[in-house]
Image: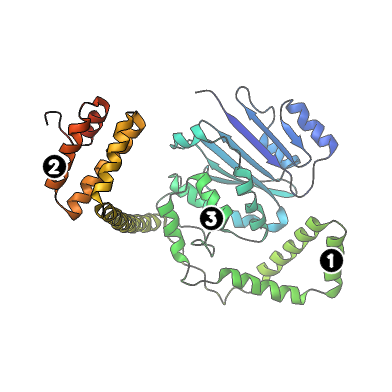
Amino acid sequence: MSEYQYYEFIAIDEPLTPKQMAELRACSSRANITPTSFVNVYQWGDLKANPVDWMRRYFDAHVYVANWCTCVLCLRLPKSVFDAGIFRAFKTETTFSVKQTRTHWLLEWVLDESANYERFAQEDGRGWMGRLAPLRDELLRGDMRPLYLGWLAGVSAGEVSEKSAEPQPPPGLSRLSAAQQSLVEFLEIDEDLLSAAGLVDPPGSKHDSEGDAELDIWIAALPTAEKNAMLKWLLTGHAQQAERKLKRQFLAWRRDQPSGAKPATPRRKVADLHKLAASAAEARKKQAAIQRKKAEIERQAKRETYLRTLADDFNRCWRNADKRAERGIASTYDEVKRSLVDLSDAYALCATRADFDRRLAKFMSRHGKRGALVRRLVEAGLWQKSQ
C-alpha cells in the first residue's frame, strides 16, 4: 500500500498575512494556500514543518489523516477561555493532550493505529475539517463535552486504568451536537461506552435552556456603554473580535457564579463505565433484534400482499412468463426466473404446490430446450433436469 497523508489547517480568528503565506509556500510548492487555509496531500515525503509550530504561529484548527490508521485534530483557543486546572482530569496518554503558548491553548485529539483498516483505505481526510471545526466554537462557549470525549476515547483505547475516576461529566453527554458526534466517529469511540457515559443526564434535562437563561441574566447586567461598544464593533467589521471578547467575559462571569445550588454529578470509575457499557451493548442487541423482527414482519406482510395480487390472475402471470421466455435472451431469462419464484410462493400461499408443479411442467414442455433458462430454474430450485 502506498503512503498517504492529508494535512489541513485553517485560520479562524485572523487571516494569514502575505508574509505568513509566503512562509508557508516556502515549505510546500504544491499546497493549496489561501488567507485562511493550507491544504496538501503527501504520497511521498512529508510536511517540511512541525504542525504544532504552525498551530502556534498561524492557525486555529488542524486535521491530519494518514493511511496507516492515524488521525489528529488540533484546536487553538485563547488562554482566557480555560483555567489550566480544567484540563488535568481529561488528559490521557495519547488520545487527548494539551500544550500551551504564551497566549493560547493547543488541544489535540488523536486516534493512533486504528484497527479499522477499511476506513483508512477508503477515506482521504477531506470533509473532516468542516465537521469538526465547530467544536472550537463550542469550547469557546464553555462546552466541556469535547474534552470529556477526548478522555472517553482514551478509555475506549485502553489507556485509562479501570480504577481511575472519570472527570466531572458535563451536561448533555446523551445529546451530543453534530460536531461532537463527528468527533466520536473520528476517534472511533465505542458507542456502548458513550451510551454508558450519557446515563448521567437526567431524563428531560434542559441543558440548553439553562444556558440561555444564564445568558439572559448576564446580558441584562452588562453596562449600556459596553453593549453599545460591542454593537459598534459588529457594525464596523470586527464581529469576531466582539464575539471573542463577549464570550471571554461571559465565561469568566459564569465561573464566578456560586455552584452550590447544583450538586455535582457523581463520578464513576472506569470499571463502572465498562459494566454499564456491557449492559448498554446487551440492550442495543436486544433492540436491534426487535427491530429486525419488526422489519421482517413488515417485509413479509408486503410480500404476502404482493403474492395475493399474483394469485388474482395466475393465467396472466404464466402468459407473461411465456412471452419473456420466447425472447430467448439472458436478461429476460433472469426475469422469468424471478417471476416463477414469486409464482411458486403465491401458489404455496393461495393454492397448492402441486398446482404450481403442473403449470410449471406445462411451461417447460414449451421451453425445456432453452438451456440457459433451464439452468436458472434448476439453480432456483424450481426444476430438476431429470423432469
The foreground one among 90 and 298 is: 298
Identity of the amino acid at label 3? Tyr
Q: Is residue 110 left or right of residue 16?
A: left
Name the residue beneath numbered marker 1.
Answer: 231
Q: Position of residue 323 (x, y in %)?
A: 31, 37
Q: Position of residue 318 (x, y in %)?
A: 25, 43
Crowdedness of circle 3 by 10 Å Cα count: few (<14), some, many (20+)?
A: many
Q: Is residue 260 left or right of residue 373?
A: right
Name the residue beneath numbered marker 2.
Answer: 358
Q: Give the mark nearest the N terminus, 3 or 2.
A: 3
> How far apart are the alpha carbons under marks 1 and 3?
35 Å
Name the residue beneath numbered marker 3.
Answer: 148
Q: Assess whether mark 2 and mark 3 are in contact (beta carbons under 8 angstroms).
A: no
Viewer-nearest of discs 1 and 2 = 2
Q: Quadrant of residue 291?
A: bottom left
Q: Residue at x 58, y 46 (%)?
A: 97
Identity of the amino acid at label 2? Arg
Viewer-nearest of discs 3 and 2 = 2
Q: Quadrant of the C terminus?
A: top left
Q: Position of residue 215 (x, y in %)?
A: 69, 71
Rendered position, 209 above or below 324:
below
Q: Secondary structure at mark 2?
A: helix
Viewer-nearest of discs 1 and 3 = 1
Q: Quadrant of residue 4?
A: top right
Q: Residue at x 51, y 58 (%)?
A: 167
Crowdedness of circle 1 by 10 Å Cα count: few (<14), some, many (20+)?
A: some
Q: Give the mark nearest the N terminus, 1 or 3.
A: 3
